[in-house]
Amino acid sequence: MPLHERKRSGPEGPPRVAAKQTTGIVPHRGTSDDPRRIGELLATWLGIQLDTIDSLTAEAQAKVAAIPDRQVLLTLLGEIIVRLGAVELEVADLRGGRR
């Protein structure tokens, strides 16, 4: 009896399917597989992504430019201190000179 006709003595499992083997590369056909078309789509997508990054960068630079520098902040702090002193003097005069 040939080897492939013998039955196994154990429980039968699901039928086994042998994997197909390919030996060569199948060439792509059709306009959808044209590498130039894929390159154009990739270039378009990349351009959109770079435009998004450019707009986000411009927005971030505008926000950073709106932050006052140290000198401006110190000037504002000095003005607040001077005005607070003036208000204290006004309040003291209104109370009759009591401090």
Image (spheres, grey):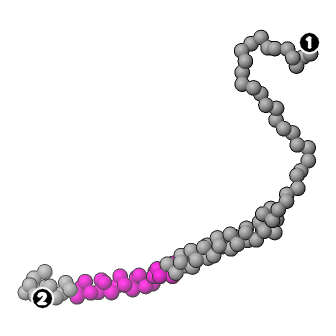
The x, y position of residue 72, in whole percent, is: 43, 85
Q: Mark 2 points at which residue?
A: 93
- Identify the secondary structure beneath mark 2: helix
Quadrant in which residue 94 is drawn: bottom left
The kind of residue tagged 1 is Met
Residue in the picture at 77% in, 27% down: 16
Q: Is residue 77 above or below residue 10?
A: below
Q: Point out the frontmost of discs 1 and 2.
A: 1
Stretch in magenta: 64-86
Q: In the rendered view, does 22 fall on the left or right side of 71?
A: right
Residue in the picture at 88% in, 52% down: 26
Q: Is residue 43 above or below residue 78?
A: above
The kind of residue tagged 2 is Asp
Q: Name the residue under label 1.
A: 1
Q: Residue furthest left?
A: 96
Q: In the rendered view, does 36 fall on the left or right side of 69?
A: right
Q: Magenta span: helix, strand or loop, mainly? A: helix
21, 5: nearer the viewer:
5
Of the image marks 1 and 2, the number of the one nearer the N terminus: 1
| Mark 1 surroundings: few (<14), some (14-19) or many (≥20) residues within 10 A | few
Tag shown at residue 99: none
Residue in the picture at 13% in, 80% down: 99
